Image: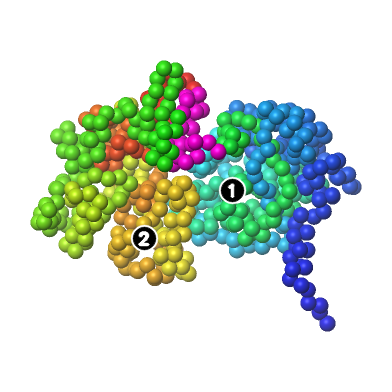
Amino acid sequence: MTAIQDPRTMAMKEKADVTGSRLHLASLKNWGEPPAPTGDDQVEQGVSVDCGWGRLIFGQTFESAAALAETIQEEGSNRRDVAFYVREPHVVLATAPQALFLDPSHTFRLGLSNARTADMTADGIRIRPAEPGDEKAVNRLYRAWSMVPVSEPFFTRIQDDPTLQVLVAEDHPEEEGMREIVGVVMGVDHKQAFNDPDNGSSLWALAVDPQAKNPGIGRALVMELAGRFKGMGRSFMDLSVMHDNKEAISLYRKLGFEQIPVYTIKRKNPINEKLFVGPTEEHGLNVYARIIVNEAKRRGIFVEIEDAEAGLFRLTYGGRSVACREALSELTTAVAMSRCDDKAVTRRLLKKAGLRAPDQISIDPDNGNAVPFLQKYGRVVVKPARGEQGHGVAVDLSTEEEVLDAIDRARAMFDHVIMEEFIEGQDLRIIVIDGEVIAAAIRRPPVVRGDGEHTIKELIEKLSRRRRNATDGESEIPMDGETERCIHIAGYTMDDILPQDETVAVRKTANLHTGGTIHDVTDELHVSLRSAAVEAARVLDIPVVGFDFMVKDPAQPGYAIIEANERPGLANHEPQPTAEKFIDLLFPQTQSMSS
């Protein structure tokens, strides 16, 4: 007769298998003397592993707190070393209290013997080992999350190193020429690193493209790495996560990870500053203000936050002080701002200078000129003459009903409504600072991919949640009439289940604030587009501006300038130095500090 086991007892046993006895595991015994080695387990001493972004320092391999503290303080410039599995961290900190701090992170462990690592794939994604030449694509992801990039030849150096496992996730694997790295994760084999008596491994530097369409990429990378370590016979895989990253912690728990008592110590440096100085005035700034403030502080420029919610701050260096609202500063005159603020004025000035812009009209109070304009061009755009972030904009309208409805919605935001011919092509944002093109990026509308299970509304909510998390709440897909119109054009309703791998663009506009994504094309920008952007900035007499172009191909001539933004968002243009160039403009004497 088979005994029926209590599920709670089984769960407790499984948890015990994961954590083991703290007295006998060097990775968990964080007090007193380390466990005595058994058999032939001769552990190497004073071990650290170069991970490209910094060193992973194994605290349990150091005989004294002083030796560990000294090693942590040998951190290289622009690196982020991590001392993990630190025994008696209070003693280590006491040896160098001005230089070191206790990292506010939690550690989680996945027991690999019974872990379900199969069938954890992401649709449309292929995972493979990183190869030499992948550094640029991987660093794009790291910079997007303000992580420390790896050095360019790093993947070449670790080709034959069994200690490190670096995996990348590729989108569109079925299209060879369209493959793009959208995720990366790094694993460290502790057995290879120092003959770990606990037979462990750990996961580091997980990053997923914040603009990836496919859900589940991070989960797939985590479990693929776990599966590889399981195949090598390792007992567990650990990872570190910030204590307030609730979404990540929830995911790890669902995957079977258990929290364990492990301490991490890092060196006080500019990269880690926000981890050890506590809450600051900058905490309430949005990502567009914060990227500028962080660069200013890095150069020793004094920052005074006037209103965090509004993005208002003042920068002072020496005898010079400049007030800013995100990328709009006192260097932009009120007249220059007014040239950008009214879209009809912007177009007239650019057309007068010989630059190309779409045909446009101001809608009469009775809408009498709207239908004739629609009949002339067949496809049109309706938007408020003033406004930003894509609010009130309706694109690619082709029926009288659509046009009149869009006019009503735009007029609810601003009395002056304009209609312009629809220009087909790619939405290109070009940033000009001090008469120089600093960044160019294609902006794409939000697209959901079907899984055969969820409704379009549910897919939009999931994508919108990922976009909010990736942009500090700046990007979200509105559940409004424009979104419903786009879904209807595609032949669906919000409540329809989208078939597996079928995609639907749920907005016509590619604005970041309404869920759009942004993809750097600075290096391939055609010279004629660069020249047009620089000339347009000269015409408007504005030092910092973002232009919205419509182009067939950013590498080819041919364009129409749609709008000019006097307060362009400088974030999300990695790897281009937008914030650095902005501070160069304001405080040119600090340029030597930007490298």
Which amino acid type is shown beneath numbered disc 2?
Answer: Met
Which colouring convention does the figure follow?
rainbow
Q: Residues within 10 Å of mark 2 (few under 14, many from 20)?
A: some
Residue 430 position within the rendered picture, expressed as x and y whole percent measured from the top left? 33, 37
Residue placed most toward the observer, 470 or 553: 470
Residue placed most toward the observer, 585 or 153: 585
> How many circles with numbers are drawn on the protein?
2
Read off the magenta span.
279-303
Q: Which residue is mark 1?
A: 244
Residue placed most toward the observer, 486 or 16: 16
**Marks 2/1: CA distance?**
29 Å
Q: Is residue 402 left or right of residue 192?
A: left
Q: Element under label 1?
A: loop
Which amino acid type is shown beneath numbered disc 1?
Answer: Asp
Vertical arrangement, residue 325 with respect to residue 591, above or below: below
Q: Is residue 302 magenta?
A: yes
Residue 325 position within the rendered picture, expressed as x and y whole percent measured from the top left? 37, 35
Q: Element under label 2?
A: loop
Q: Quadrant of residue 316?
A: top left
Can residue 500 be seen in the rendering of this structure? no
Judged by depth in the image, the label closer to the viewer, 2 or 1, is 1
Vertical arrangement, residue 261 with respect to residue 583, above or below: below
Residue occupying the point 33% across, 28% down: 330
Residue 183 position within the rendered picture, expressed as x and y whole percent measured from the top left? 53, 49
Q: Residues within 10 Å of mark 1 (few under 14, many from 20)?
A: few
Q: Is residue 374 left or right of residue 95?
A: left
Vertical arrangement, residue 425 with respect to residue 371, above or below: above
Q: Is residue 194 left or right of residue 410?
A: right
Q: Which residue is mark 2?
A: 479
Which of marks 1 and 2 precedes in the sequence? 1
Residue occupying the point 77% across, 46% down: 27
Residue placed most toward the observer, 457 or 189: 457
